[in-house]
Amino acid sequence: MYLYSVKPKYFCMKTLLLCICMVPVLAIGQSRKERKAQAKADKETLDNIRKHIEFLADDKLEGRRTGSPGEMLAAQYISTQFAADQLLPKGDQAFTQEFSINEGKQLPADANSFTVNDKALQLNKDYYPLAFSASAATEGASSLSLREKGQPWFFDVADLLEDNKSNPHFNIFDVIAQEVRHTAPKGARALIVFNSGSAIDNIQFNKNDESAAASIPVVYLTHEGLKKYFADPTDYYHLKLTVKLVPTSRKGRNVIGFIDNQAPATVVIGAHFDHLGYGEDNNALDGKGQVHNGADDNASGTAALIELGRLLKNSNAKHNNYLLIAFSGEELGLAGSTYWLAHNTLTPLNYMINLDMVGRYDSSKKLTIGGYGTSPVWGQVLPALSDKNLLVKFDSTGAGPSDHASFYHRNIPVLFFFTNGHSDYHKATDDADKINYTAELDVIKYVQHVVEATDGKGQLPFTRTSEPEVQVVNLPVTLGVMPDYGFNGTGMRIEAVSKGKTAEKIGLKPGDVLLQLGSYKFVDVPTYMQALAKFRKGDTTQLRYRRANVEKTVPVAF
């Protein structure tokens, strides 16, 4: 399960439960022969669950980070299991569907450096190159207050910001680009931008900037870097600067198996199999450097998916086709499920069941089944089902930080199975020896019973549910929107708007691209989050956004 992760802020793992009710425990009569056969079948499933999780959560897979060799090993394993269970391949390359994750321009730490009098500045703390900088190296002796031909030049934007504080059309990046065009022909070897004043300058690194590269290196010196390394504006400093920007993308892969019952509609059962690797994407709660095996998140759901494929292949429930999808890129913001839906050719889809973190059942926390309100049929089916070993609570909403949300936002009924959070979530301690294997077996059987109970009910109607506002740790206010993490443009595009929250009240819609909140501009989700952190409940401000290439401004009251 993914964090809406933004350095250093994190979204809460789960939304609030909206509708909770206990499932009654009913006795199901079986003959002795049936009980014996069931016990044998359960042992096979139990042994398989353990085998799957121990493989997927082994150190040799190095945390199954999307695009990594470990993710490829996991995809190969899942493909092998689907083939052994006689599922049909439904990927672009047998069972596999590849997709690209565009990570924009990156600044490799080992390829970028800035020293002042042989003292090294810290990248992203003391300075950072701008996204339209040239990738080049230079050095020289310079003063903040004097420009000499053949040396790096400094550019203080403080007066410009003050002069344009009431100008809504002022764009600091246009000004910097113009300064580069004027100064480079005059002998500037680099342009070092800083702000000696207190005005907000909104100078940020925009990884999605597609403008042409400048002819010289262009870097921004932060307030901290300016104060620490350039205390005397009249002094000369010996500078060495190397800038390297690298356009970066990686390949993720979904694994897709199909059970073709020649039915009119298809049920999707999904689970993401990617995890955090060594924490390289800044989504680990215990930092980088350790292997994050993700036994519960989400080797457990992947193991359940594989076993459900095997069980449904041999099931008498034949009124739907079944598509088993192991998604990758979930930890990066539902990348795999979003991609699959955008390229899906199987229609109609009846409903989707998502299994994410189903390996740590605890009776005190119960098994949560989300999406209860996304179809009236769930209210007819689920209360009639039971398992003597599971206590269940229902969550009505179809939204949330896992792959079912991608389907819900496309008006497809969903169910989300989740055994709730624990202290090992997104940490290197989420290992296979902590899985409650017998309870996971019960979860798998429960899902199978749900599928069989809906087999004869045709196309399930969809109901939109109330959507709780996504809560943010340490952020005092929110707009009530879900970011589109697949957006590669400048700004923060909205994936979904929570009903009844601020965004809906001011007329925002999915697809709108948010650009500025008060004085704070943002270029992506992290800088959007940083802007939100500047406000408190009761504050009023202006929000600038773009809809269909038309920019608009609306008042906001938090």
Image (cartoon, rainbow, N blue to C red):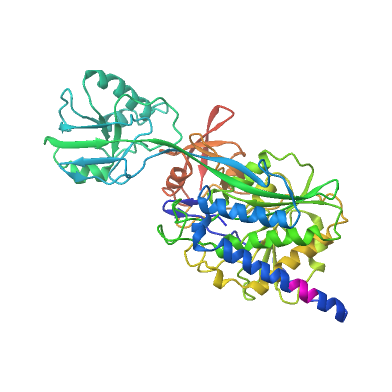
Q: Is residue 4 visible?
A: no
The x and y percentages for residue 303 are 65, 62
Q: Is residue 544 left or right of residue 44?
A: left
Quarter placement of the N terminus: bottom right
On whether residue 159 falls in the magenta region, the answer is: no
State the predominant SS element of the stretch in magenta. Answer: helix
On whether residue 40 falls in the magenta region, the answer is: yes
How many marks overall?
0
User: In terms of image quadrants, where is residue 238?
Assistant: top left
Q: Is residue 248 above or below residue 382?
A: above
Of 173 and 242, the residue lying toward us = 242
The x and y percentages for residue 522 are 44, 39
Q: Which residues are magenta?
A: 38-42
Q: Is residue 221 left or right of residue 532?
A: left
Of 360 and 249, the residue lying toward us = 249
The x and y percentages for residue 212 are 40, 24
Q: Is residue 150 visible?
A: yes
Residue, far bottom: 32
Residue at point 30% right, 40% down?
Answer: 112
Residue at point 59% right, 61% down?
Answer: 299
